[in-house]
Amino acid sequence: MATVSSERLAAHIEGDFVVFLIGIRINKPWKLHKWVPVITAMPKMLKELDALPSNETGFLGHTGLSMGVIVHYWRSFDHLEAYARSKEHAHFPAWSAFNRRMKSSREDVGIWHETYQVKAGQYEAVYSGMPPFGLGKASELVPATGSRSEARMRLNG
């Protein structure tokens, strides 16, 4: 279990970054052969991304692995896109297989994602009584004091 910090901390990351949200919606739960492969593919991708060097992939980390939403943090959209399109990594074959499987039954399982490009200093995050989590886990945690003590101050740099 991760160590809980007794400090009030803020996330700090140098430069721009990307937040990528991805999720699944099982519309026809009885069609196990349609959604089980999707659910089993994501942990493999996350394990692969965690093992690859961050300075090469641009993958900074993730939070969550559930039927709801998984949040990814990336150094840039170019890094995210390069991984998604790489035939040497887990995503592309899984995505191709999903598209073949769902070709005539897109309504059985929904997949969605949203990508946000965050400019340097245009974010705020605070954690109190928490282990490293979210952006704080994917970046650096610093004391939420002084210019980082209030949300508006963190957001305005």
Image (spheres, grey):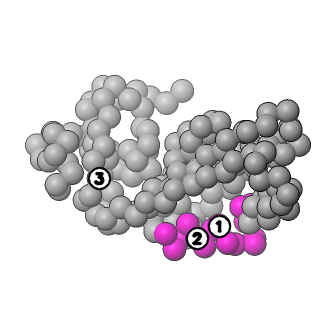
> What whole-number distance in Å separates the C-alpha atoms at marks 1 and 3?
25 Å
The extreme left residue here reads 146
Task: State the residue at coordinates (10%, 43%).
Answer: 146
On residue 84, the disc is: 1
Q: Secondary structure at mark 1?
A: helix
Q: Earlier in the sequence, mark 3 or mark 2?
A: 2
The extreme right residue here reads 33
Q: Nearer the viewer, residue 137 or 86?
A: 86
Q: Which residues are magenta?
A: 77-91
Judged left or right of residue 47, residue 121 is left
Amino acid type indicated by mark 1: Ala
Point out residue 139 in the picture as x, y percentages from the top left corner. Answer: 39, 52
**Label 2, residues with CA under 10 Å away: few <14, some 14-19, many ≥20:** few
Amino acid type indicated by mark 3: Tyr
| Residue 111 in view, yes or no | yes
Q: Secondary structure at mark 2?
A: helix
Q: Quadrant of the N terminus?
A: top right
Task: State the residue at coordinates (16%, 55%).
Answer: 156
Q: Is 94 above or below relative to 55?
A: above
Q: Earlier in the sequence, mark 1 or mark 3?
A: 1
Judged left or right of residue 42, residue 126 is left
For label 2, the residue is 81
Pointers 2 and 1 in contact (C-beta within 8 Å) = yes
Task: State the residue at coordinates (86%, 38%).
Answer: 31
